[in-house]
Amino acid sequence: GGPALRMSDDSWAQELAQSAGGFEAKEASRWLKAKGGGKDDESRRRNEAILAWLAANDVWVSELSGWNEPPHSMALATSTFDELEGEDSGRGLLARRAIPQDAILVRLPVRLCMTKAAALASKDLRGVVSDATNEYVAIALLLILERAKGERSFWKDYIAVLPTVGDVAATFTWGDDELRFLDGSPARAATASMCAKLRAEHAAVLEQFPRQLDPAVVTFEAWEWAFSNLFSRAIRLKAGRAEEFLALVPYVDFINHSPFSSSYVDARDIPKAFPWEAEEDEVVLFADRAYKQFD
């Protein structure tokens, strides 16, 4: 593979850490600062669609009890408020009722996540993504191609509720006028480095696979959108494996974490009811503390 697809996963993590750290916390928060997504009929329709998709794929999100399932304790809101930032944080999860510490908030099969394994299994990325491919690049390409499929995508209802580049408002997507606010800050150089890296990686991927990847689909705008979502919401999971893996986890990634929160998200083997059932992993989110209703 070429330089883009073989780039070390650590190099992306280091770039992001350099860009988001090493300067004042207030400046760092600008990297992944979310703008509000107001309440409207379309937002509510999209919420209902992703909840129906989750329910159809073995995720219990009903407020009613089921067989061996308590009522789901959370609700997906079209708009939430970040008290620390004093601003609208867009879509998020709220406590539907009081939740005790260490309670399981949600369980979700790993097969619903967008991962490098899912990219490897994608027919659209056959011959493009390999074992040597960087995780960020693999998932970014999967996300872009699945969005391009529209209604034919398995993840269409999840993709429909992902934020836009403008919603995430990461500094590497800012224009020159906005970037002037960072003049004199280490964030300015870090942002320039990230922009250059993204453009170089995008160009390298298209150059390496001119026949497999359509430049009208894998545009730089789409690339920027994919990485904005990866950097702002991807989670590292382990699931008993020797190494962690990166994942976009539908629904779970709408939890608006406090920086002081220690909520635990990881993957584990799903307990089998019968010996002949296939082994499968699930993502589990535990409450780091007790939550009041509407927290």
Image (cartoon, grey):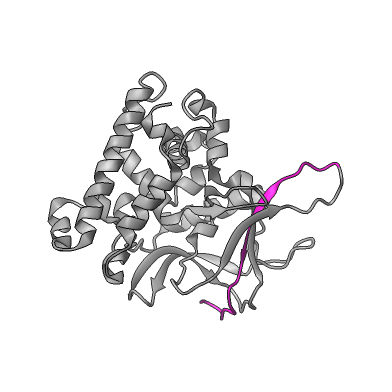
**Residue closer to the observer: 283 or 37:** 283
* Residue at screen point 32% across, 34% down: 202
Relative to 234, does residue 104 appear above or below in the rendering?
below
Note whether residue 19 is visible: yes
**Residue closer to the observer: 258 or 198:** 198
Residue at the extreme right of the image, as rendered: 275
Q: Main secondary structure of the magenta part?
A: loop
Relative to 260, does residue 238 appear above or below in the rendering?
above
**Coordinates of residue 163 in the picture (x, y in percent):** 38, 53
Task: Specify start and end residues of the magenta stretch as a single range.
Answer: 276-295
Quarter of the image with the N terminus is: top left
Residue at the extreme top of the image, as rendered: 211
**Coordinates of residue 80 in the picture (x, y in percent):** 42, 69
Note whether residue 219 is visible: no
| Magenta span contains residue 48 | no
Relative to 276, does residue 207 appear above or below in the rendering?
above
**Coordinates of residue 219 in the picture (x, y in percent):** 31, 34
* Residue at screen point 66% across, 72% down: 103
| Magenta span contains residue 286 | yes
- Answer left or right for 189 relative to 206: left
**Coordinates of residue 46 in the picture (x, y in percent):** 47, 53
Relative to 295, does residue 243 appear above or below in the rendering?
above
* Residue at screen point 32% across, 44% down: 224
**Residue closer to the observer: 141 or 57:** 141
- Answer left or right for 217 relative to 101: left
